[in-house]
Image (spheres, rainbow, N blue to C red):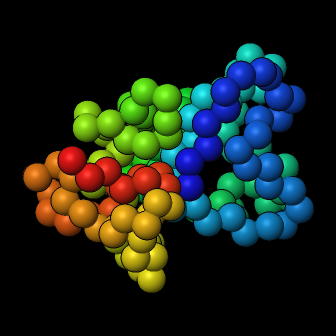
């Protein structure tokens, strides 16, 4: 998944709004360029059990403190699109296990392509698999 806001300001952020006792699991995704009242808010958790039911791994999220498998580096999209450029930190950084059963990206390209010639065949973060 890729979420990129092209302008405007929202009240609570527009990526994920968790309300009630929902369980949220997000993997291999990019959340970038969203604000709420001028503050970066990608995930607004309004659940009755905050943070206990949200699992976010192998994601690129603007404004978070990078830790574990999540990063906050600019995904470096190609000009005019949401495809990753050759210098994107999201290439070969997602979880193959989380993408099990998803053989193709949004354009029909094979997933699990070695896009950086370093780590071997690994899924990219986001909806598009980078192919040099």
Q: Is residue 131 left or right of residue 5?
A: left
Q: Is residue 11 left or right of residue 30?
A: right
The residue lying furthest to the left in this view is 118
The residue lying toward the viewer, choosing from 17 and 102, is 102
The residue lying toward the viewer, choosing from 111 and 95, is 111
- The residue depicted at 89 percent of the width and 62 percent of the height is 20
Residue 47 at least partly seen: yes
The location of residue 56, given as percent across then percent down, is 55, 57
- The residue depicted at 43 percent of the width and 27 percent of the height is 79
Quarter in which the N terminus is drawn:
bottom right
Name the quadrant containing residue 31: top right
The location of residue 11, given as percent across then percent down, is 86, 29
- The residue depicted at 45 percent of the width and 76 percent of the height is 102
The residue lying furthest to the bottom in this view is 101
Residue 74 at least partly seen: no
The residue lying toward the viewer, choosing from 131 and 36, is 131
Above-or-below relation of 121 to 88:
below
The residue lying furthest to the top in this view is 38
The residue lying toward the viewer, choosing from 21 and 42, is 42
- The residue depicted at 77 percent of the width and 35 percent of the height is 13
Q: Is residue 128 left or right of residue 49?
A: left
Above-or-below relation of 111 to 117:
below
Name the quadrant containing residue 92: bottom left
The location of residue 82, given as percent across then percent down, is 49, 40
Total labels: the figure holds 0
């Amino acid at each position: 998944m890729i979420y990129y806001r092209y302008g405007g300001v929202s009240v609570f952020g527009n990526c994920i709004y968790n309300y009630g006792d929902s369980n949220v699991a997000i993997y291999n995704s990019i959340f970038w360029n969203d604000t709420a009242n001028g503050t970066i808010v990608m995930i607004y958790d309004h659940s009755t059990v905050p943070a206990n039911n949200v699992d976010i791994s192998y994601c690129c999220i603007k404004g978070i403190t990078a830790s574990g498998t999540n990063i906050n580096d600019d995904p470096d999209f190609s000009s005019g699109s949401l495809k990753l450029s050759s210098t994107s930190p999201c290439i070969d950084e997602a979880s193959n296990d989380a993408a099990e059963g998803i053989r193709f990206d949004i354009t029909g390209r094979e997933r699990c392509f070695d896009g950086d010639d370093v780590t071997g065949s690994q899924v990219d973060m986001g909806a598009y698999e980078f192919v040099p």
